[in-house]
Amino acid sequence: MSYVAPLKEMQFVLDELAGMREIRKLAGNEDATEETVAAVLEENAKLMAEVVAPLNRAGDIEPSTWRDGEVRMPPGFKEAFRAFVSGGWQGVQHPTQYGGQGLPKLVAAPCIEMLHSANLSFALCPLLTDGAIEALLTAGTEQQKSQYLPKLIDGTWTGTMNLTEPQAGSDLAQVKARAVAQGDGTYRISGQKIFITFGEHDLAENIVHLVLARTPDAPAGVKGISLFLVPKYLVADGSRGARNDVYCASIEHKLGIKASPTAVLIYGDGKFPVGAQPGAIGYLIGEENRGLEYMFIMMNAARFQVGMQGIAIAERAYQKAAAFAKERVQSRAVEGSPGPVAIINHPDVRRMLMFMRANTEAARAIAYVAAGLFDVAQGAYDATMRTQAAAAYEYLVPIVKGWSTEMSIDVTSTGVQVHGGMGFIEETGAAQYYRDARILTIYEGTTGIQANDLVGRKTARDGGVVAKALLVQMRATAAELGESGSEDLRAIKATLVEAIDGYAAVVDYVVSNYNSDIRSVFAGSVPYLKLAGITHGGWQMARAALAAARKLKAAAGDEDFLRAKIATARFFADHMLTSVPGLGKSIVQGAAGALAIPAESF
Ligand SMILES: Cc1cc2nc3c(=O)[nH]c(=O)nc-3n(C[C@H](O)[C@H](O)[C@H](O)COP(=O)(O)OP(=O)(O)OC[C@H]3O[C@@H](n4cnc5c(N)ncnc54)[C@H](O)[C@@H]3O)c2cc1C
């Protein structure tokens, strides 16, 4: 089996760290019983391991292809997609009213992880569809919802997100696509979008594009962007009608995720004219000029999922590396051995595997905790709790996206290293994980953009209130660790406290210098994101160690698993958390070096 879902670990994080027991008590979550959640995860794991994961390598060798505007997916993808949607997996977290399963985001998170571990390229189609569903749920009219949501949720149709244009990447203020009102409630859309994931494919009968465009009299910049729904085929009486004027001019040849088609889409150039007027038919979502606001809903959902992609690919790379390290025999043990040993016995290989394992577990814990906060923000009975959870979730989104994906590049690269020369050879698959992971820090907002968000909107804007509230919770965990009789837990405490102090100093630095020395603050934005990711990871691993120690004491649970959890938390503290004070210095003192040399001297 090329991928086995880490169900025991997932269940542990759900129950012990992310608050599953409390979340199932919230209004609307009654169906998420212990038995249901366990059954959902097991069924999902089975489908992913047996149907979706085996296509991962095939899709890399035989990527999707373009011909005359049509895109053909690699062999097996269509059947796997049918199995995925007919099992109801697109709808795990979406409302039952539209055919979803209505389960909490916290239950969706491990399902999403398994899907991405199984096949990153394949998983992008459901990822984008989820984003389209979220945007429609938030800003669509009742008619749009009833017309599109059931078909998106049951997989008859899929969704896309059309932001990027050649001149508008990170800077969406530059979007030029045009939308002209027709006076009958529809708009005519024209322009070019690039890099559109699953912008064209043969997995479903229709594609629902969500497109950012400007009306003729819209204000300049982001305040003049509106969001439109533009189906590939128009919808008549609830089913697929005439072809709309959008077509796929080409797809990209890429470093990784080769099975996922990345499309150039041309809107309204008359290839498939609809009536006498030029332009593809589009329908406004929400109000004019509020498009970016709605798109942010979609982007936040997608950013969370891209973070999950990082965790998922790291998990898969770890599984492969661990299996290889047990098989590959090379060199005698440093302490002496009769003959060469499996490389897993060499201390440095063990360190590499622990690096992969600890980082993946830490990032998973942050992401699931964030998903739990999302559910609390939606369903808690107490309004203050809802507001606080929403703020903490928002703060964590750029960390889940930015840190987990940066982490995945390090982890998949280490996976190649564990394989030695074979890692560089495509047959093992380790190289594919590394190549596939490389996009994750770029799309859905580069790491730089996530870090800017963390600094500006999430830290400076509220004077660091949310960050500081999280720091208070971290200190409470540290205090609890200190009360433990375990040497491991006390060692974790010492390192965690240093990291918390370093983090607190950086939050103060960001808040106090944001207005007076903004360039310096932003020069440290990515290191701040990294520092925050590591400290949150260390905090969650410390909580995991505490929970494992409690369970061990109560003789509840698998002893090997629980001991390994404590050891992994200790590794994370000793090898990752220890870097926080250094990162803190580079943020507080490092701007001068980063900005000293003038642009023309490069
Ligand atoms: C495979 C793939 C799939 C994609 N899928 C989609 C999709 O489905 N829909 C869609 O709309 N788009 C999609 N994209 C586009 C993707 O979101 C953009 O590539 C990404 O947002 C970066 O924009 P850019 O490529 O123009 O880079 P640029 O914006 O030109 O960035 C170049 C560099 O400058 C940095 N930079 C730019 N602005 C700032 C700033 N303000 N502060 C600090 N650093 C900055 C960036 O961090 C980056 O390092 C996809 C791209 C790829 C490659």
Image (cartoon, rainbow, N blue to C red):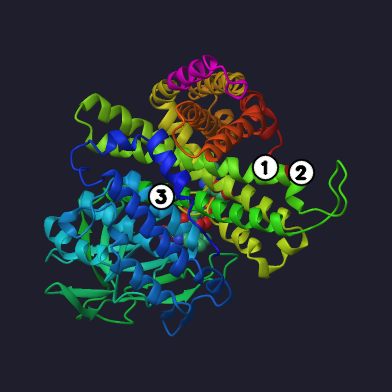
475 in the magenta segment: yes
Q: Is residue 144 left or right of residue 498?
A: left
* Quadrant placement of the N terminus: bottom right
Q: Which residue is mark 1?
A: 599
Relative vertical location of residue 90 with respect to residue 156 in this rendering, above or below? above
> Which residue is pictured at 21% across the width and 74% down the height?
234
Label 1 close to label 3 by CB (< 8 Å): no
- Residue nearest the viewer, comparing 553 with 34: 553
Q: Amino acid at mark 1?
A: Ala
Label 2 close to label 1 by CB (< 8 Å): no
Residue 170 position in % (x across, y down): 47, 50
375 in the magenta segment: no
Mark 1 to mark 3 CA distance (whole Å): 45 Å
Q: Which residue is mark 3?
A: 110
The residue carrying mark 2 has its beta carbon less than 8 Å from ligand 1: no
Label 2 close to label 3 by CB (< 8 Å): no
* Quadrant placement of the C terminus: top right
Say few, some or many: other residues with alpha carbon within 10 Å of mark 2 (under 14 / 14 to 19 / 20 or more): few
Q: Amino acid at mark 3?
A: Pro
Residue 263 figure quarter: bottom left
Say few, some or many: other residues with alpha carbon within 10 Å of mark 3 (under 14 / 14 to 19 / 20 or more): many
The residue carrying mark 1 has its beta carbon less than 8 Å from ligand 1: no
Residue 183 figure quarter: bottom left
Relative vertical location of residue 222 with respect to residue 426 in this rendering, above or below? above
Q: Which residues are magenta?
A: 471-489
Q: Which residue is mark 2?
A: 348
- Residue nearest the viewer, comparing 34 with 109: 34
State which tag comes first along the sequence, 2 or 1: 2
Say few, some or many: other residues with alpha carbon within 10 Å of mark 1 (under 14 / 14 to 19 / 20 or more): few
> Which residue is pictured at 20% across the width and 43% down the height?
30
